[in-house]
Image: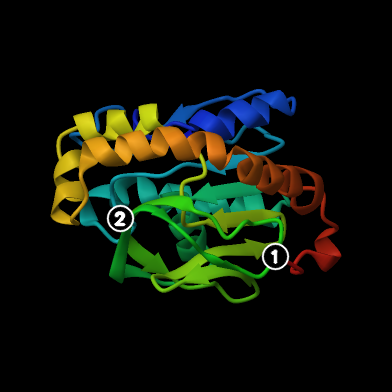
Amino acid sequence: MVEHDPLSTPERVGAYLEKRGATLVPFVVVEDIRDPAVTATFPDDPHDLVVLMGSPWSVYEDRVQGWLGPELEFIRSRLAAGVPMLGICFGAQAMSAALGGKVSHATRPEYGWTGVGSATEQIAEGPWFQFHHDEFTVPEGAVELARNESGVQSFRTGRGLAVQFHPEMSGQLLASWCREEGGAQELIAAGHDPDGLIEESRYWEVESQPALERMLDWFLDEVAGADQTNSGEG
């Protein structure tokens, strides 16, 4: 479980993975969210599954390059070895970058609960929670699974699944983001009321649970167990 900072925790995603029998082993990349300019050595222990969580930073920022390079190599090596991988928001962008895709500032940043256009019934059209100002392309050889007006929302590559949205979101998690310096200000600048969005999230964390479970069941049972010779199919 790659947690890029102390606030980017798996919450509902982690809870459901544990319900399905997973044992979560967190690896926190940046211990102090105020100082992301650090280096990191990613674990080389064998894992049955890798989950890449979100981050308040962008893959193209100079201050994260001390650990981003090792992370991109970690992603490439694990995917090449056939290790199942789920990337969420920054984690999805990192998967795209690791495989030759492009990550850039979004022309339409997204905040709050929004819908997506999905090419598979296993990824519901939402609403899903969004909190991002970047967009990414689908890397060569991957299959796009969802998008909306802001750009790509999901792709699959082998045993890897990337989603731009935050399926882990809860009211409690969003409240922790808003308490951190910059979180609430970013929402206000985008025209959102942080307190109202926290309350909305308390509602949708319950209503969206079946969609979360359906997507994770599909990821665990089909994507993670896919035959690598036929792994590009969505």
| Residue at the spot 55% in from the left edge and 72% down from the top edge | 139
Q: Secondary structure at mark 1?
A: loop
Task: Look at label 1 and name its amino acid.
Answer: Thr
Q: How is the image coloured?
A: rainbow
| Residue 227 shown left or right of residue 75 in the figure | right
Looking at the picture, tell me which residue is in the foreground, 27 or 221.
Answer: 221
Residue type at mark 2 is Ser
Residue 111 pos. (x, y %): 32, 54
In the picture of the structure, the residue carrying the numbered disc 1 is: 120
| Tag count | 2
- Relative image position of residue 210 (x, y in whole percent): 65, 41
Which of 164/194 is in front? Answer: 194
The residue shown at (47%, 57%) is 164
| Residue density around tag 1, few if under 14, some if 14–19, many if 20 or more, within 10 Å | few
Residue at 33 percent across and 63 percent down: it is 134
Q: Kindly tell me whether residue 106 is visible in this rendering.
A: no
**Residue 77 in picture, x, y percent from top left:** 61, 52
Q: Can residue 68 be spotted in the picture?
A: yes
Q: Are marks 1 and 2 in contact (CB under 8 Å)?
A: no
- Where is residue 44? Give x, y as percent: 59, 36
Q: Residues within 10 Å of mark 2 (few under 14, many from 20)?
A: many
Looking at the rendered structure, the secondary structure element under dot 2 is: loop
Whole-angstrom CA distance, mark 1 to mark 2, is: 28 Å
**Which mark lies nearer to you, 1 or 2?**
1
Residue plotted at (41% across, 44% down): 54
Kindly identify which numbered label has been placed on residue 58. Answer: 2
